[in-house]
Image (cartoon, rainbow, N blue to C red):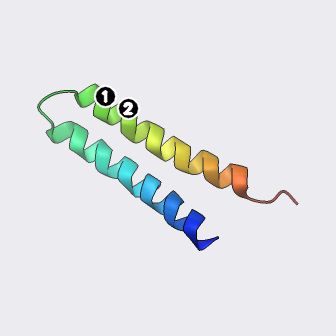
Amino acid sequence: MYVLFVLYLVLFLAGFFLFGAAFTATAFQGLIFTAGILAISLAVALLFHTTRRT
């Protein structure tokens, strides 16, 4: 359970890092920004997918 939480946290924070890195990059800004969006989306999707439904 803690391993999954660390995975979510790393993906989520990496997405924010990629958002910021996209504005300072000299090339491939759109690709880096899109990777940030995908990282955050994946973190949220994994979180919702792995939680138990009650």
The residue furthest front is 3
Q: Residue 31 — which label?
A: 1
Contact flag, marks 1 and 2 (Cβ < 8 Å): yes
The residue furthest bottom is 2
Of 23 and 6, nearer the camera is: 6
Query: At 56% across and 68% down in the image, what residue appears?
Result: 3
Q: Marks 1 and 2, how far apart in space?
A: 5 Å
Image x and y of residue 49, in percent: 71, 49
Q: Is mark 1 on a helix, strand or loop?
A: helix
Image x and y of residue 23, in percent: 20, 38
Which quarter of the rendered picture does the C terminus lie within? Answer: bottom right
Q: Label 2 is placed on what type of residue? A: Thr
Would you place residue 11 above or below residue 23 in this image? below
Which quarter of the rendered picture does the N terminus lie within? Answer: bottom right
Query: At 38% across and 36% down in the image, what residue appears?
Result: 35
Tell me: 40 left or right of 14: right
Q: Residue 54 — which label?
A: none
Tell me: 37 left or right of 21: right
Would you place residue 10 above or below residue 17 in this image? below
Tell me the crowding category of disc 2: few under 14, some 14 to 19, or many 20 or more residues within 10 angstroms, Cα based.
some
Query: At 59% across and 63% down in the image, what residue appears?
Result: 4
Q: What residue sits right under mark 2 in the picture?
A: 34
Image x and y of residue 13, in percent: 39, 57
Tell me the crowding category of disc 1: few under 14, some 14 to 19, or many 20 or more residues within 10 angstroms, Cα based.
few
Which image quadrant for residue 31?
top left
Would you place residue 5 above or below residue 20 in this image? below
Would you place residue 48 above or below residue 35 in this image? below
